[in-house]
Amino acid sequence: MGGSEGHRLFPEGFLWGAATSSHQVEGNNVNNDWWDWEQLPGKVAHGDKSGDACDHYNGYRQDFAMARDLGHNAHRLSLEWSRIEPAEGRFDRGAVEHYRDVLGTLKSFGMATMVTLHHFTNPRWLTAKGGWARPEVAGLFERYSRHVAEQLGDLVDFWVTINEPMVYATHGFLLGLWPPEKKSIVLAFRVAKNLAKAHGRAYHAIHEVLGVRGRRPMVGIAKNMMLFDPKNPASRLDRMVAQKLDRIFNRSFLDALANGVMAFPVVSRETDPRLDGTQDFIGVNYYSRSLAAFSLRKPQMLFMDLSVKEDAEKNSLGWEVYPEGLYRILMSVKGYRLPVYITENGIATTDDRQRERFIVAHLREVARAIADGVDVRGYLHWSLIDNFEWKEGFAPRFGLVGVDYKTQARNIRPSARLYSDIIRTGSLP
Ligand code: BGC
């Protein structure tokens, strides 16, 4: 495979870059629910607190210059809602100006911008009102999104309203792992519905504000897609569970945005015609595969049990490294007939050679999906720099570029150079 063979692996204009999120890199997001939660003992591994994180709030220009020098032509980042709207209905001019500089810097470097409006963190005032469990959140999210579209819209090429809605709903409201630590299946799917409705309203707000003079904003979500295979392929029940998980976790949200029907387990089915067709592209976040099995011991999980293939290669968090899953996921979203952007894909590892192999193997699968007709138009690696990995703290190393958290020094890893060569040549080693 290679450019020299006369055919392109990746189409003209392909977006190449990396992704980050505000709370994970900026530092001092003191006004959100994660900040509060991190202060409590035992919540984050090793007692880590996001603190200054990567000090990217101040150092974004240098970080972006590094990305540009590595050949990235695009970057995905998230805006911190709690900075932009620190109190309900009060928008902060300074925060907006800051993000104008951030996005303007990327533009001045000739890079396309992909902006996420919600990446797991919430303003403290929203949490105090009941956050995503309350139906009012959709209107509040719409107002924030409209404000951002008005103030920053000229600098944004792609919009991701919500990052990984099903991960947010399950981690915060079903598994009790993240704030607000609820463990209720009903609540989790109610939250999923609220996220879908909020997305729909933001989608239309952004289109109303920016869809003028023949312009058409590109709005979507970043959907975490987990590959589910039956633990025992010979078991009909395991196969059924794998299918069901795929439907619930991977498809239900995307389907709601495609046809307006919110069909989640245990909560009432609802149709909202305004939700119909509210994606201009599909954003895929892909990391790993899980094995699914039927288990009588998991009634609270609808009898579904998840595990990781034992003899598989893993990352430092114990997730299976399974490149073929990316191909299978990409093929599975072909039917939506929308352009696809890989909005996240990456590996936590302290062995940079493993990251090199990961990148090449996954991009090979992307190229294969493109050859098989999936309209993939970009790949944004997670992440540009090491960062605060939520409940796991600072230990996992996801960066193309390493961060020394004591000095804030950056260290460009060999994998970043390899990725840069791939971008430059458009071919895979
Ligand atoms: C999230 C990121 C996270 C990454 C690695 C995705 O679920 O969007 O915030 O750091 O995966 O776990």
Image (tube, rainbow, N blue to C red):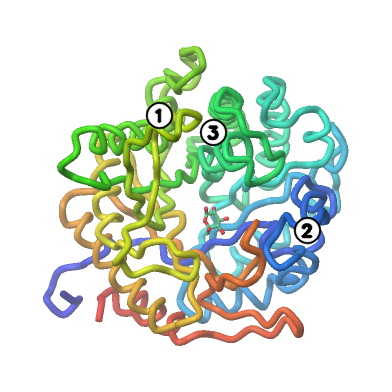
Is residue 95 left or right of 135 when viewed as pictured? right
Viewer-side label of 1, 2? 1
Residue 380 position, x and y percent, is 45, 61
Q: Earlier in the sequence, mark 2 or mark 3?
A: 2
Q: Determine which residue is flagged by label 1.
A: 252
Residue lying farthest to the front in this orientation:
297
Q: Quadrant of ligand 1?
A: bottom right
Viewer-side label of 2, 3? 2
Q: What whole-number distance in Å separates the C-alpha atoms at marks 1 and 2?
A: 36 Å
Q: Secondary structure at mark 1?
A: helix
Viewer-side label of 1, 3? 1
Instruction: Using a 10 Å C-alpha cutoff, classify the residue at mark 1 as few (fewer than 14 neighbours), some (14 to 19) or many (20 or more).
Output: many
Q: Earlier in the sequence, mark 1 or mark 3?
A: 3
Is the residue 44 above or below the residue 217 in the image? below
Which image quarter is the C terminus in? bottom left
Residue at image location 19% in from the left, 60% down from the top: 368
Amino acid beneath label 1: Ser
Is residue 300 left or right of 294 when viewed as pictured? right
Taking the image as drawn, is residue 208 in sight? no
Using the image, tell me which numbered label, if any, was put on residue 398: none
Amino acid beneath label 2: His
Q: What whole-number distance in Å separates the C-alpha atoms at marks 2 and 3?
A: 24 Å
Q: Determine which residue is flagged by label 2.
A: 98
Q: What whole-number distance in Å separates the C-alpha atoms at marks 1 and 3?
A: 28 Å
Using the image, tell me which numbered label, if any, was put on residue 211: 3
Residue 82 position, x and y percent, is 79, 46
Residue 301 position, x and y percent, is 47, 32
Which image quarter is the N terminus in? bottom left
Amino acid beneath label 3: Gly
Instruction: Using a 10 Å C-alpha cutoff, classify the residue at mark 2 as few (fewer than 14 neighbours), some (14 to 19) or many (20 or more).
Output: some
Q: Secondary structure at mark 3?
A: loop
State if disc 3 and disc 1 touch (CB < 8 Å).
no
